[in-house]
Image (cartoon, grey):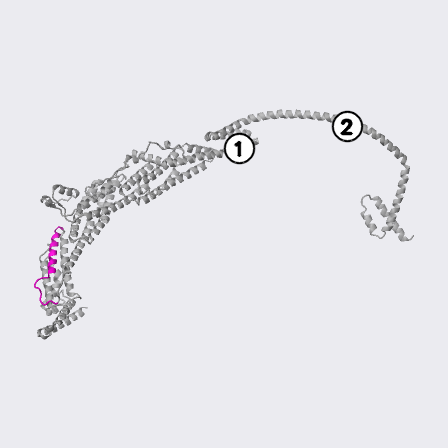
Amino acid sequence: MDESSKEGKGRHDLLLQEIEAIDDYWGPTFRAIFDTDECDAFADKLDSRIRSHDKDIEKLCSAHHQGFIESIRDLLELKGLANRIHGEVQAIDSDICHSVTQLKLKGQELADARRIERNMKTTIEMLQSCLPVLRAYIKLQQQMKEKRYYPALKTLEQLEHIHLPNISHYRFSEHMKKSLAKVRESIKEASMVDLKDFLESIRKYSPKIGEVAMRHTAEQLNIDISANSSAIKRLISPTMSGEFDYEAPSESEYSVEEDLSAQDLVDFSPVYRCLHIHTVLDAKETYENYYRKQRKKQARLALQPPTNMHETIEGYRQYFHGIVGFFVVEDHVMNTASTLVNRSYLDDVWNIAVSKIASSVRTHSSYCTDPALMLKIKNLVMLFSSTLKTYGYSVSQLVELLQEIRDHYNEVLMQRWVHVFRDIFDEDNYHPIQVTTPAEYQRVIESFPYRDSNLEASPFPKRFPFSSLVPKVYRQIRNYIQACLQFSQDLNLADQEIDDTLRRYTNLLLTRTLSGCLSTLIRKPSLSLLQLIQISINTNYLEESNAWLEEFIAQLTGASRELSHIARLQGRAVFRDVRDDAEQQIYEALKRKMDEFMELANYDWQLNEPSGQASSFLMDLIAFLQSTFQAFTNLKEHVAQNACLTACRHIAEILMDLLLSDDVKSISMGALQQVNLDVIQCEQFAASEPVPGFEDGTLLSSFLDLRQLLDLLLSWDWSAYFHDYGQDTSKYLRVSPQRAITVLEKLREADKRTVFSVLKKSERDKKKLMETVLRQLRQLLQSSA
């Protein structure tokens, strides 16, 4: 055997030893075998080793076979014995188990009985400690069911502060606490429902409460809230008697069914209960905020005036009653629950409310055009402010509001008096009043305090210098003053302040209303000249009435005469201005009438010879002027003089315009002489002094321009004209070169139309002289330019 065979055998032995020595894992050994190429040799070696071990086992079994048989026999005997012992042990074990089971059952029953006894004792003790809680809780549930929330709140307090702390270690107490929290909310919600019902009720009864409060105030202050209701309409009557049928509101309009107070009309207990409940529930602030918020909403609703408030007094009453009722209720709550409503809160609400009240009344009263209704509004505002003043509210803004309403009231009055004055003007015949009996004379004197000894001494029929317009206007001014006084009464104003107010409003009536009406009247185109003259005469006597009106105001107000100069009536100035305007209208009307006569002028400018007398239209005009100036006897002297002077100047202007008119292309000497005759007639009229009081030559000076021009043209005194031109002593000082040129050219034009004038030497010389005069006049005109 070679050396490699030995090495392989030795390696196989080692591997077999490893396999025999290891029982469970031969992986490395097998890997080492398979890593070599001797697997078959090792398999043979392994088979050889297995056979060797089998032989050893057979030898061992043969050597111990007898002993094995005996051991088996012994084991069989032990088996029988063991089976018998096992049966006995099982029987004993069964008996013991049965006994133990019975013992356990009895022990368990005993333990259960003792546990039940102990639990019963503990339960009884616990139930005894929980019974007050349960009783209180059941009582609480019953009270909640019966809606007796105030007692339920007391029970809830007992549960939370007395009973529940004693059972706080029980779990059900937590559930009960949660349940009580729900009960607390239920009480709070239920009390809020009562409060909402109260708020709805108080909103319903607030107008009634306010009505009662305002009536009580009227009784305490002795205010007649139905006074002055018909006086204003009686004063507006345009008749001299001043009668006007008007039915005053009865007392029943302001009365209530029963004399009830706020407490009688409304149950305030829900407010106090709710306040107490929320105080206990630690939600007082929430409740106060809610109450104030809801009441402010109701205040806003109360402050909203009815849409048709301005139409009738009932709208204003309803508005004021609701507001007074609101603040009376709040005042009562403040006095009984000061923490809920305090003075500062009420003052804040009032300060907001009074501005809205003033604005609403101001707006709605501005639509009012009925003075009687405005007096009722004034009385209501006064009563409203007096009522709230007794509750401690500031009413200064309402006093200012009354002053504004007073101003609007007087504007309404003045608008009414515009129609009154217009009706008087339309009804007047503008003729002096004539009375035939002492009774008629006395009625006029009573309506207008005019005194004239000559008129009193004259026999009937008597004639006043003024028309019926004067006493009617005077009476209506007095009525207006009385109507103004109606509003100022009961405003707690001093006599002097009332006096100044009446004078101020009377001045407004005079300067605006009456002055405007008179100005409109005198500008009516339908008025005749005589009517304008009568209006001017009327203003004289209306001016005199100014002192009587001042005395009348002083008698009404009782103010000191010494202090009345502060606001004098402006009637004199007003009537003076109107009279001046009327005088101007008289002058204009006189001119228009004169123009109607002058439109009839039909001069024949080619006339050969004058008619020998003044024109007929001019004679008619002078006759008209003479009769017209006789109607000026009752006018002041200067008016008649101005009218007469205006008439003369207007005639001179018309005649001058006729001579200088561009429409007249030529004027004959005969036509010029006819104009001269007319001017002579006018001069005679002026010299006759149709109106006395003129200085000598004043009226004649109106025709001086015409007279000098005609004298110059008719006398042909051109040498004197040119010699004295520009000198103050000139005989023809008022004749301008332009006027002379104009008339001369028309005379020259008339001469051209005479066919045979060129055949006469005198006419040819005259023509040359005329050309020479025209040339010199143009030179004067150019030199003066």
Q: Residue furthest right?
A: 1
Give percent across and percent down for residue 233. Answer: 24, 41
User: Can residue 454 be seen from the camera position used here?
Assistant: yes
- Name which residue type carries label 1: Lys
Is 176 drawn above or below residue 640 in the view shown?
Answer: above
- Look at 60% across and 25% down and name the residue there: 120
Q: Quadrant of residue 447?
A: top left
Number of numbered discs overlaid on the protein picture? 2
For residue 696, above or below residue 290: below
Please state if 291 lies on the left or on the right of 599 as rendered.
Answer: right
Q: Nearer the viewer, residue 749 or 291?
A: 749
Taking the image as shown, residue 17 lies to the left or right of residue 125, namely right
Residue 699: x and y in percent read 12, 58
The answer to whether residue 694 is seen in the rendering is: no
Amino acid identity at mark 2: Gln
Give the quarter of the image for residue 20. top right
Residue 763 sits inside the magenta stretch: no
Pair 2/1: label in front? 2
- In the rendered image, residue 180, in percent from the top left (x then y), is placed at 51, 32
Q: How far separated are the C-alphas under marks 2 and 1? A: 63 Å
Question: Of the numbered discs in the image, which one, if any, rests on residue 110?
Answer: none
Magenta segment? 606-634
Q: Secondary structure at mark 2?
A: helix
Q: Say whether disc 2 or disc 1 marks the residue closer to the N-terminus.
A: 2
**Residue beneath the point at 71% across and 26% down:** 101
Q: Which residue is mark 2?
A: 90
Q: Main secondary structure of the magenta part?
A: helix
For the C terminus, give its image quadrant.
Answer: bottom left
* Front one among 88 and 456: 88
Q: Is 628 contained in the magenta span?
A: yes
Helix, strand or loop at mark 1: helix
Label 1, on which residue?
177
